């Protein structure tokens, strides 16, 4: 007998748009919740965010498809268009919220109140309702939050530069949005646990700024402990060597090393037929390797450049030295180890990517989900 979907009893109303809030909605859908996505008559703005590869498709295909960006976070949901600037739309939302467990919102502070879609309005007839609200800078700052801006303001773009004095770069995905989504999931799960004990819902607020700062982790600790700003190092690691640097090999394979211990470094040296490096006073310990980073990186770069990268990766795996090939997104998703993270295609969408990446013997996740709907197919009420 299969285990139950853990949230099959939950009803979620998603008022959020773009990425962070919809990611949370899909998370609950994958675990069995009924998720109703409410959109304005214009639709979630990400419906229009198409790449040049999408816009180059034949006209009929373009009209029938949703954008890849929208598809990234909207599997498994029912959809409804409501105009919350009207009394009728607000009344419909009130009726839906009276029977819901969680509301997901991403309004600027003050905007939800204008639409009567705020925590106080929606919990008046449902004290068990849990309201998750995403903002850019907190409930008292009406400034809109955008991922790229937060990546800049929270230090991520500075740290992601190739090196000191090099141009700052944002991450290739909306990392701050995704971090905020995880924070909101954690807050909502905590609220659900508390509600089981008290019978009362809660307001859970998450800001993009707080989520980004919380994720600075060791980089923030470096500044707080030393008083010195950590330096941008490209893909290198400030306190471990070799770790993260990309090396090119003789057969064109790019690879990275993640050598976290002196024992792993010794095994790396043997695999490279350079056992003497492990006893060199400059490289024998991680502390000395950090101090002599530039010299070691030059030696590794030259040595690996003369090596077959695929053969080296196989030998490193045999010796339990953490290393991996640099893959394209397509290569990563086509790898057999990624199969469990893919959703089977449906309704004109070729495939989807799961948001749930954990597993348990105590419950199941949905094996199939309905595909993200096109705006033209949403019921207008």
Image (spheres, rainbow, N blue to C red):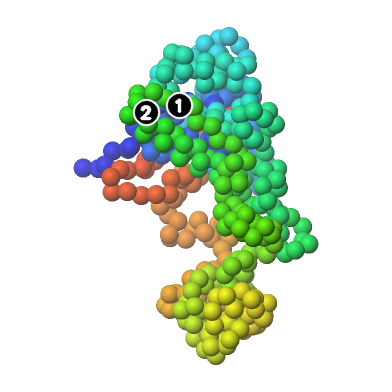
Answer whether residue 186 is visible to the viewer in this image.
yes
Of callouts 2 and 1, the N-terminal one: 2
Name above or below for residue 46 compared with residue 231. above
**Could you classify mark 2 by the number of other residues whose Cα lies within 10 Å: few (under 14), some (14-19), or many (20 or more)?**
some
Residue 102 on image: x %, y %: 44, 27
- Which residue is drawn at the image coordinates 28% and 38% (left, top)? 4
Name above or below for residue 172 compared with residue 336. above
Residue 366 on image: x %, y %: 37, 40
- Which residue is drawn at the image coordinates 66% and 52% (left, top)? 156
As rendered, which of 274 and 213 lies closer to the eye? 213
Name above or below for residue 261 compared with residue 189. below
Q: Is residue 109 left or right of residue 325?
A: right
Q: Are circles 2 and 1 on residues that touch, CB within 8 Å? A: yes
As rendered, which of 151 and 364 lies closer to the eye? 151
Give the residue number, with chain letter if any, for mark 1. Answer: 202
- Which residue is drawn at the image coordinates 59% and 78% (left, top)? 288
Q: Is residue 32 left or right of residue 203?
A: left
**The residue tagged with tag 2: helix, strand or loop?**
helix
Answer whether residue 252 is visible to the viewer in this image.
no
**The residue tagged with tag 1: helix, strand or loop?**
strand
Q: Is residue 294 left or right of residue 25?
A: right
Residue 317 on image: x %, y %: 44, 74
As rendered, which of 341 and 148 lies closer to the eye? 148
Residue situated furthest left in the rendering: 1
Give the residue number, with chain letter if any, for mark 2. Answer: 195
**Could you classify mark 1 by the number of other residues whose Cα lies within 10 Å: few (under 14), some (14-19), or many (20 or more)?**
many
Residue 1 tag number: none
Q: CA distance from mark 2 to mark 1?
A: 8 Å
Residue 377 on image: x %, y %: 53, 25
- Which residue is drawn at the image coordinates 21% and 42% (left, top)? 1
Residue situated furthest top in the rendering: 87
């Amino acid at each position: 007998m299969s285990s139950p979907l853990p949230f099959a009893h939950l009803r979620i109303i998603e008022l959020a748009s773009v990425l962070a809030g919809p990611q949370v909605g899909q998370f609950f859908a994958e675990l069995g919740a009924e998720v109703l996505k409410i959109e304005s008559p214009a639709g979630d703005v990400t419906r229009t965010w198409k790449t040049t590869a999408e816009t180059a498709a034949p006209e009929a295909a373009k009209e029938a498809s949703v954008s890849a960006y929208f598809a990234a976070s909207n599997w498994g949901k029912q959809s409804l268009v409501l105009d919350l600037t009207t009394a009728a739309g607000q009344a419909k939302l009130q009726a839906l919220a009276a029977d819901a467990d969680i509301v997901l919102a991403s309004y600027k502070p003050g905007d939800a109140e204008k639409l009567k879609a705020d925590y106080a309005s929606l919990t008046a007839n449902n004290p068990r309702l849990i309201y998750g609200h995403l903002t850019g800078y907190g409930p008292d700052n009406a400034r809109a939050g955008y991922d790229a801006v937060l990546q800049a303001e929270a230090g991520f773009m500075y740290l992601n530069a190739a090196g000191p004095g090099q141009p700052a770069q944002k991450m290739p995905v909306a990392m701050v949005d995704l971090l905020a989504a995880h924070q909101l999931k954690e807050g909502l799960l905590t609220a659900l646990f508390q509600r089981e004990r008290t019978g009362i819902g809660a307001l859970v607020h998450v800001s993009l700024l707080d989520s980004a700062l919380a994720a600075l982790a060791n980089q923030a600790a470096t500044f707080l402990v030393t008083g010195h700003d950590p330096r941008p190092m490209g893909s290198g690691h400030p306190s471990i060597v070799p770790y993260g640097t990309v090396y090119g090999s003789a057969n064109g394979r790019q690879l990275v090393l993640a050598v976290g211990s002196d024992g792993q470094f010794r095994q790396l040296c043997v695999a490279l037929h350079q056992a003497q490096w492990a006893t060199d006073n400059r490289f024998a310990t991680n502390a000395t390797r950090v101090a002599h980073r530039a010299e070691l990186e030059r030696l590794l770069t030259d040595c690996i450049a003369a090596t077959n990268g695929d053969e080296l990766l196989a030998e490193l795996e045999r010796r339990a030295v953490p290393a991996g090939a640099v893959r394209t997104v397509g290569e990563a998703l086509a790898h057999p180890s990624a199969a469990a993270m893919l959703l089977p295609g449906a309704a004109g969408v070729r495939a989807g990517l799961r948001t749930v990446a954990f597993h348990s013997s105590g419950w199941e996740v949905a094996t199939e989900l309905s595909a993200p709907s096109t705006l033209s197919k949403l019921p207008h009420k």
